[in-house]
Image (cartoon, helix red, strand yellow):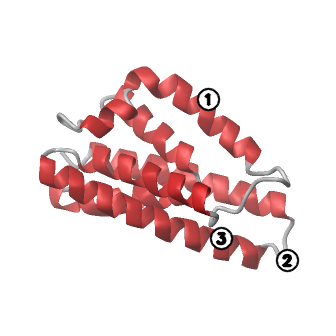
Amino acid sequence: MKLQHTPALAIGIGVVAGLRPMMALAVVAWGLRRRWIRPGRSPYARIVSAHASKRIAEFAISELIADKLPFTRSRLDVVPLASRIASGAICGAAMNGTGQKRQLEGAALGGLGALAGAIAGYCVRQRFNRGMPDFSVALLEDALAVGGGVVAVALAANAE
């Protein structure tokens, strides 16, 4: 994959953040730790650095559990939506992070991807909940977030 495709990867990791914000951070941290992502001098990469990857992974696992609880707030409420957009922006910038302009572009694309992912995830989950148990739908969404994140990071590894 060529470097010109990294904006699509920033959007893709943003969509993952829209579904599961900590999972997006966890897969980017995992990619940084394995040196699959080389974000250059990106300050955003420090947030999801290899040193923080264990703690971020713990938060991601907690998020997967908390999502199944009945008292979990809607992803479209202000605070959860803002955290998804922030996660998407950080991850998008880290994925795109080769130059100052590209980092800003990656942050914007990642944030927009997160917004789209949050809205689409909400709509799809509402639709599937009519015919399937919520727990099953949530597990499918988890699998999509994990798989999509790993694919985005793997494609970023081949972008260089």
Give amino acid for label 3.
Tyr
| C-alpha gap between disc 1 and disc 2 | 32 Å
For label 1, the SS is helix
How many residues crowd around disc 2 within 10 Å: few (fewer than 14), some, or many (20 or more)? few
- Identify residue for label 3: 122
Residue drawn at x 37%, y 58% is 110
How many residues crowd around disc 3 within 10 Å: few (fewer than 14), some, or many (20 or more)? some
Give amino acid for label 1.
Glu
Location of residue 61 in the rendering, given as x and y in whole percent from the top left corner: 66, 36
Residue 88 location, quadrant: bottom left
Residue 58: assigned label? 1
Q: Is residue 148 left or right of residue 93?
A: right
Q: Is residue 23 left or right of residue 27?
A: right
Q: Is residue 43 visible?
A: yes
**What is the residue that sits farthest to the front in this orientation?**
78
Location of residue 64 in the rendering, given as x and y in whole percent from the top left corner: 69, 44
Location of residue 81 in the rendering, given as x and y in whole percent from the top left corner: 56, 60
Residue 159: assigned label? none
